[in-house]
Image (cartoon, rainbow, N blue to C red):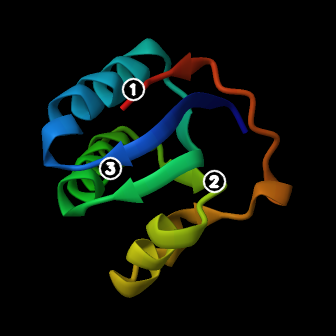
Amino acid sequence: MALSRIALYGEIDFADCTQLRSQLAIAIAATPADLLVDCAHLTFIGSHGVDALLEANAHLEATGRRLLVANLSGSPRRVFDVLGLAHFVHADRDLVVVPELRTAV
């Protein structure tokens, strides 16, 4: 499976969503591959951040691709679980994550 990768760092809240959407758009446009979002260093994600990821997934699905979320733990993992988004989450042992595109959002 071909993957494009992006890594998220720190906290993603309302103030960070414009930058996150921009970075996701760049990653999606860069290659026809699926998009892996590495959350190993993500400490918080709010509803606007989740919405940005869901929008990215919709764009990917429209072209036969998918969004994968890896290395999600702690508070961000609980957000995905509570929202019923566990199907996006893949255990880090399933994927070797070496980010090609990094964002400081």
Q: Quadrant of residue 97?
A: top right
- Residue drawn at (63%, 53%), measured in percent from left and top? 70
- Residue drawn at (68%, 31%), measured in percent from left and top? 2
Residue position for label 3: 53
Question: With respect to residue 33, does 68 lie above or below?
Answer: below
Q: Is 5 left, or right, of 27 in this rendering?
A: right
- Residue drawn at (36%, 38%), measured in percent from left and top? 63
Q: Is 103 left, or right, of 72 in this rendering?
A: left
- Amino acid residing under circle 3: Leu
Q: Quadrant of residue 28?
A: top left
Marks 3/2: CA distance? 13 Å
For marks 1 and 2 on the same chain, the one whose residue lies earlier in the sequence = 1
Task: Find residue 28 and name its label.
Answer: 1
- Residue drawn at (30%, 43%), measured in percent from left and top? 56
Rate crowding at label 3 as few (under 14), some (14 to 19) or many (20 or more) other CA atoms within 10 Å.
Answer: many
For marks 3 and 2 on the same chain, the one whose residue lies earlier in the sequence = 3
- Amino acid residing under circle 2: Ala
Q: Position of residue 77 (x, y in %)?
A: 51, 71
For marks 1 and 3 on the same chain, the one whose residue lies earlier in the sequence = 1
